[in-house]
Image: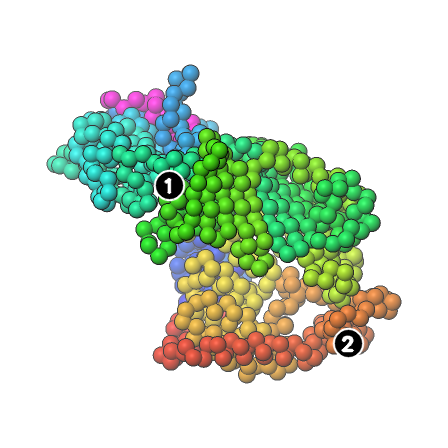
Amino acid sequence: SRVNDWGNPDRLVVEGCRAFPSSDVKSAIGFDLAMLLEGHPAAPLDAYLAALANRVRAGYLHMGFPDVRVDVRIDEAAEKVHVVIEEGPRYTAGQVIVRGNHEVSEQELVEWLVSPCPPDDSRVGGVSESGELKWIDREGEPAEMEEPVWKIGEPAQFDESAVSKLTHRTQRAMASQGFFPLFAVKLVPQEDGSTAALVIDIFDEGSRVVLNEIKIEGNDKNSRDEILEFLDVTPGMPLRGDWKAEIEHKLWRSGRFIESHAMLERTGLDGNHTILWLRLVESPAAPRLSEPLSPAQNVLVRFGEQMTRPNQWPGDLVISVVGPGEHWEFVASTKYGFLGRVRRDREPDENDQKADAPGSRHFDFAFAVSDEQLGISLLHPRGARLWRKSTVPLPARLTGNMGLRLTNEPDNPVALFLGLHAKSLKNGQKSQPFEFRFDVDPAYFVAMPDLREGSRCTMEDGVLEYDWPSNECLRVDAATGRLIEWVCRGQSDSLESMTFVFEEDAFKKRLAEIERAHENRSNEFDPAAPWSSCLKYFCNESIFRLFQVEAESEPTRLLRLLRVVHERQAFESLVSLLHNRAVGGNKHRDKFTLPPSPHEESFADGCTAGFLAMGLRAADVACVRQAWPWTLSREVMLMAAEKSEYFLPELARLSKSDETGPLFCLAAAMAYDRLSPQTGTLFLAHHGLERLSVEDFEKDCRAILDSRGIAGQYARRVVRIVRELEPEEVEEVLKLDAQGEDSPVITFIRTLRSQPDDTDDEALFKALNAVWTSGLRDMVEQQLTVIRDRESDGVNYPQMEWFWSDPLGMPEDEER
């Protein structure tokens, strides 16, 4: 059997909790990515129940309960899933015991486990005056230390993930002393019944590792002797723990290699014959290691080193983007944060005249993010601020990365990487909440003069100037590598120029200008109702009109309606609904936590896994489970995350359902269009064109606006507000605009108010049906026709038959 709705967190009943509230356990399960994936309605039920028991058990092991027992059973009569827990005793982390060591220093080993530790890809960069090692990353910056893996006095973590981390840290600790022994790590509860010891048994300490042989692959340009001399490695030398990072860093920083990997192989009967393997991909544009870089390459490498080390920036990075009638400006500061502002060409109005900052008064929109404030501000029209100031540290830091890498593909020599990473800030740590980093390989800057045909590189008066045929110009100070200016001109019709420069204290200067220019604007942020005030602010028509082509045109009816609705506190009820529906945890310190699962670890970064988990859980809050909006929104998210195991059969099931109509077919076709082959897209378009009746449309609307979901409850709140409007308020909303009397908003409002004796539910769907017949049907039909005609030529008929087959073997009348 399949999971169907047994994966609904609301069905969970958690019993036997003593150390934590049952709501803690339920909350952790509800937001756990592993359970959100295992609980897919089409997944096997037995596998889901087993995964549920294993995840709860893993959570208790992680929180210090090695003897926990978890049983999961289904109560079909009550339609509940019971999770029964027998906790057993709890243990905290105690002493570290090392057994079997002779030459391995126990003190150094323990220090690596109970103290902050350098990350895997760091290396020793020197020794401080106090004798402590200085660890640096590959850019030469101080490495950010990782947390201890054995925190004495805190709950001992018995779960598999934690033991794996302990084993890895122990291995690194002994490698730092030059040993690669055979050992085992285990957690042993002590006789006192409250602490657990970390026991490290070293079975074969072995001798310090000595390099016996070196093998190199991929060195067509550079000779073996050149590489070994550059690395300063020879057979017979001992290896220390950071050997891998040191070798790979040297090769990376040389700028001569696109890829470089170092690894050890232990051979021989006793495993004491050590071979160092170097696997390289050389850059065709770089000179040999024995040959010096050209003057231009040296300057560009220094420029790259400075750009990739934000704490060495000579000021704040200012990015100016100019387009037809627009000016965008962004400032990234390593000390203070990130801000931006936008200006559209127009005549100053009376509000501008009140501003005290003439140089900035024409910037219509501004935002700032720093450790002390988070704000958005508008000047025109009827501008207002949403500005939060606080001395309380923000809980996380976002890092935006832009990377450039050389590839060994002649047709595509450069790859661009963009990333966004989140990191929690603990123990009141203060940091600006957003930082921007360049991550560019030195090999790119070495190859830069030869990357584009027709480029020109000159050096005059101490300035390197590099011009591309695409109207780009880079100017760098030759002595320091400091960026003077990077300008890109006329890349498209919408872009006149884009400029990168460094400016001292640019963030503070621009922020002061924003505050002076906007100080007369009301601040819409309400600390007592933060989420509600934000929602109201973004409903302000100024937000929607900011980049309207005809800036002076009358506001649309829809924006007037939105304003009227939010003025009557409709958003207050929405925030209340969200708060009541969301699965929240308690704020006490000892909160039940699940360790990372293989599902999270399969992602390149935890940020993506976290966003996917939040998105899947949000679908539960916004939509009714098992309805097509819930299913489709989840499947699209899973498809985007490459976790779409059931996307195709679920889409086929919904397509054959009598409960879906044209809106589903259009939305699903647009989502399915991302897959290949597009057979399903064609059939969805065909079926959508066959389901254009009012009855089919109303099926979709009732699924989207089911009163059990947030969207449906909010829609009914809006209906109640509109039906209670006074006649003069209705006329204000219905002022003529460019759409004339056939406006969907006019049709909706007038139909909604035409039958005062109808219930709100009846009035809502009558009004929606009127909008459908008055023009929306034609728009949907046109879109479906375009998709059908576009896909018709590429149909693969065997795949058509597969799409409409029943690949999961599920009866069509099976209750979902």
- Between 48 and 328, the one lying in front of the other is 328
The residue labelled by disc 1 is: 446
How far apart are the alpha carbons under marks 1 and 2? 64 Å
Which range of residues does the magenta coloring cover? 102-119
Question: Which residue lies at the image location 63% right of the left edge and 68% below the top edge?
Answer: 706
User: On screen, 648 above or below 539?
Assistant: below
Residue 669, image x and y in percent?
51, 72
- In the foreground, 114 or 263: 263
- On the question of residue 51 being in view, the answer is yes
Q: Residue furthest front?
A: 460
Task: Report crowding for label 2: few under 14, some 14 to 19, many 20 or more residues within 10 A (C-alpha).
Answer: few
Q: Nearer the viewer, residue 581 or 250?
A: 250
Residue 440 percent across, percent down from the top left: 43, 42
At x 78%, y 66%, the residue is: 722
> Residue 485 appears at what percent x and percent y?
54, 40
Q: Amino acid at mark 1?
A: Val
**Where the N terminus falls, by quadrant?**
bottom left
Q: Is residue 407 left or right of residue 89?
A: left
- Choose top left, top right, bottom left or bottom right for residue 291: top left
Local packing at callout 1 (Cα closer than 10 Å; few below 14, some 14-19, many 20+) is many
Q: Single out the residue that lies furthest toward the left.
A: 269
Is 131 included in the stretch rendered in magenta? no
Q: Identity of the amino acid at label 2?
A: Glu
Q: Which mark is residue 535?
A: none
Residue under label 2, please give it: 741
SS for tag 1?
helix
Q: Could you tell me which secondary element the residue under label 2 belongs to? A: helix
Horizontal side of residue 276 vs 378, given as left or right: left
State which mark lies toward you, 1 or 2: 1
Which comes before the other along the chain, label 1 or label 2? 1
